[in-house]
Amino acid sequence: MRHFLLKSLAWTSGVLIALALVLAAAVWLFFAPVATQPPYRLVASWGGLGAAPGQFDGPNGIAVAGHRVYVADSLNHRIQVFNLHGQYRASIEVSPQGLLPQARPMNLNIADGKLYEADYWNDAVQVFSLDGHLLRTLGGKTGSGPGQFRAPGGASAEPDGTVVVADFYNQRVQMLSPSGRFIRQIGVTGKKGYAASGRFNYPTDVAVNAHSGDFYVADGYNDRIQEFNAQGRFLRMWGGPFGLHLPYSINVLGGLPGWFRTPTSVAIGPHGDLFVADQENNRVQKFAADGQFLTAFGHAPRQPGYSVGAVAVASDGNVYVTNQSAQRVEHWVPVASGVQ
Amino acid sequence: MSRKTRHHVLNMSGSTFAPALLGLAIALAGVFPVQAVTQMQTPAPHADAYVVRVDGLACPFCAYGIEKQFSSLPGVTGTDVNLANGVVIVHVKSGARLDQAQIAKTVKDAGFTLKRIVSTPAEGK
């Protein structure tokens, strides 16, 4: 009897393992896209931990405009400006808005020749000229009402000036007029959404197409990207099978190509491609505008933390990434093109 | 499967596939290892600080969020967050005290779950 039970158990286990392997192969075949472009190569980096000019303490946002690289140096409460080779040029102090004694700048984006900075601690979006002058502040009072924020993670603007904000703790994306008047929102305020499109689980950043106004949202803890048109209508989502995220699920497969583990930043390249900072996978992933996976690159962190925080793309296609664990900015180039 | 077809499949509306995917995820959980296993070391007690362990901390957004929530409590002078082991150290003014309910609510408001309070100022050195 005991022998029979053991034999049955072994047989059942074998069948289950074989089934799991078949399922794994099916997932790989159907849901793990193949890279169609070569990866990128790390050619330079700069920074290091500290508060002196050129050093960082929590580089959590980055943007490139022309020959300038802007880095949100979160724990130093400033945005630092460099040239494309990492030479320090200037610093923009991010002033507190009155709620807390310190600002905490997060993702940065460039739109219509202006720098958009999300201040996570002061619940504000600040708009600067590219030479660092504060043009206006949206929000600045914590809350869940229209036009208020609870820890905005990233903001940008459509070609007509409509401001789009990833409102992290409010679980929504807000669309506001240039002066901050509420237009509409996507998502349900304060309610996490998982499988459904147009719902969010801690959105971290937005990237707006400068021509069409369509925008992408890094849906952080849903491990996916959602795309909307300029009016906020859902277009598509991806990151795992159909972009679905199941409540309380463990993202054991998030390391597959085209899948994510906590996307924290998004940026659009000169040809409309989308670059995603896939933080917990320590990599940047590149997609065509319609979500087709193109390639991925990155490296393991050498210190505690993650080697990828935020991503930006220059007009020549070179990519700049904040390495949070090393407190540095990295410069990556497409392998085929070499150093430019 | 051609790349075009694969791309089409990847972008299909997926809500009807949820039950199948749930089963698939459960089956695959046994095949693919979870990426990282955190070293569970016990942090040293701090004078004038609460050391708490929190579930779900993953990124700087989490760290700054929990830091922001604790900063709003009276008596709190600063917060250190260690993402790698899920430990939050809440520094308080000498004599200031927080109770467990207050700490648990603050952690919850930041979007996380309090696992346990490892040490309090009274137990600190």
Image (cartoon, grey):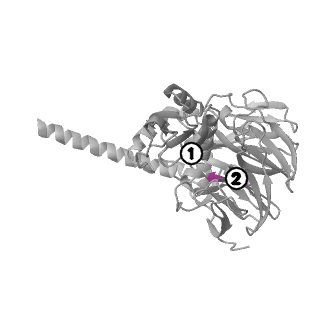
Kindly indicate the quadrant of the structure image that contains residue A221: top right
The answer to whether B86 is drawn above or below residue A320 in the figure is: above
Image point (71%, 48%), residue name: A107
Which chain contains the residue that carries disc 2?
Answer: A
Q: Residue at x 80, y 54 (%)?
A: A92
Q: Mark 2 near mark 1, Cβ–Cβ under 8 Å? A: no
Give the amino acid type for the residue marked by disc 2 in the picture: Asn
Q: In which image quadrant can residue A40 be found?
A: bottom right
Q: What residue is rendered at 53% in x and 30% in y?
A: B98
What separation in Å lies between label 2 and label 1 (alpha carbons)?
Answer: 15 Å
Circle number at residue B80:
1
Q: Is residue A274 magenta?
A: yes
**Quick one: A301 or B8, which is closer to the camera?**
A301
**What is the x, y in percent for residue A112?**
86, 50
Magenta residues span: A271-277
Task: Judge by depth and name the residue closer to the eye, A319 or B47.
Answer: B47
Eyeballing the image, is A145 above or below A105? above
User: Which residue matches tag 2?
Assistant: A76
Looking at the picture, tell me which residue is in the foreground, B60 or A100. Answer: A100
